[in-house]
Amino acid sequence: MSLLTSNKYLTAALYKFVSLPDYISMQVPILEACERYNIKGTVLLAPEGINGTIAGLPNDIHNVLNYLRTDALFAGRFADLEHKESFANEHPFYRMKVRLKKEIVTLGVTGVSPTKQVGTYVKPEDWNALISDPDVILVDTRNDYEVDIGTFKGALDPKTTTFREFPQYVANNLDKNKHKKVAMFCTGGIRCEKASSFMLDQGFEEVYHLQGGILKYLENIAEEQSLWEGECFVFDQRVAVKHGLEVGEFDQCYACRHPLSPEELQSQEYTPGISCPYCYNTLSEQKRASLTERQKQVILAKQRGEAHIGEKHPPKA
């Protein structure tokens, strides 16, 4: 992947499933370390591990990552913490938050954790061969609006709106006696890692998941060899990425957060900051008035040369 040297801010996406019975005591020290290095973003802590996306100047990001990997407070539990990097000219976050959660990715099923059991990791270089096997059932574990803009060829779309709906999808559509080989994937690897643990808990024998997720696949696999179709939704200012992790063509509706294609941005039902074809007919008058006032403040802030704190995804056009 080639990165523009002019890009100033480094974004690091990180997660690790590891037993953290003392996770509450980590909240303040991690927040203080991030604030000390002017890092912004969100970190989630739970008994099952850590998950987060943080951004700042490159040296500052690496200082925080080194702190997580080496400080005695964590007793070596984050020593092999992996992260994915991307760069941006503008800071993607406005504040730093460290939140305590029951799960770092919410499935809602008690006892399921990759710290106990997990499926077989498959490297991006071996993924094409696996999912080309006719005996393999390929499942996209992401939400419906993510699947809408891109997925792997032949993948099943559970049409879930949250990860909590995944167990019911499995109960209704997959059979451990019939589907002997199940392969799953998600954006960065965290969701399908937990989904694989759930599937094993349900009695499925051979469960595979894409190591590093779609992002690592798009980074490592050349487009002419790829089985990926479309773009990959990401939860930052880029909205979507393509092969080589180049910024994609999609923008995002502020009101409903649905990704929007260039064609949808030309729709009469799209109004920047207020509505799009996916939510145009669902907004209450009160919500529409609130969004209209917010968009007005965004425009006024731009005229003053300031960034409006609510404008998380500024339009690309």
Image: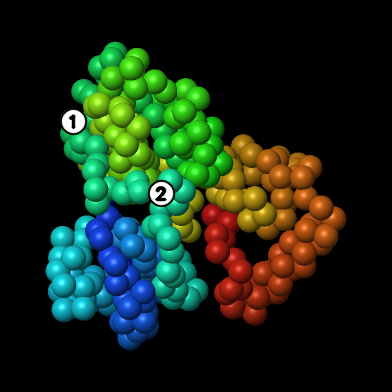
> For this view, does 87 lie left or right of residue 273?
left
Report helix, strand or loop for mark 1. Answer: helix
Can residue 214 be seen in this snapshot?
A: no
The residue lying at 14 percent from left, 69 percent from top is 76
Image location of residue 280, percent across then percent down: 75, 44
The residue positioned farthest toward the front in the image shown:
111
Q: How far apart are marks 2 and 1 (CA)?
A: 32 Å
Above or below: residue 100 compared with residue 288? below
Image location of residue 33, percent across then percent down: 31, 82
Q: Mark 2 points at which residue?
A: 110
Residue 184, located in which quarter of the rendered image? top left
The residue lying at 41 percent from left, 73 percent from top is 98
User: Type of residue at label 1?
Assistant: Asp
Can residue 162 be seen in this snapshot?
A: yes
Above or below: residue 281 compared with residue 134? below
> For this view, does 90 lie left or right of residue 274?
left
Q: How is the image coloured?
A: rainbow
Q: Tell which of 38 and 296 is nearer to you.
A: 38
Q: Mark 1 points at which residue?
A: 126
Above or below: residue 229 compared with residue 274? above
> Dot 1: few (<14), some (14–19), or many (≥20) neighbours within 10 Å?
few
Report helix, strand or loop for mark 2. Answer: loop
Q: Tell which of 237 and 128 is nearer to you.
A: 128
- Residue 148: give its label: none
Above or below: residue 160 compared with residue 18? above
Image location of residue 218, percent across then percent down: 30, 40
User: Type of residue at label 2?
Assistant: Thr
Residue 207, located in which quarter of the rendered image? top left
The residue lying at 60 percent from left, 78 percent from top is 305
Q: Tell which of 239 and 50 is nearer to you.
A: 50
Q: Which of marks 2 and 1 is nearer the N terminus?
A: 2
The residue lying at 70 percent from left, 40 percent from top is 277
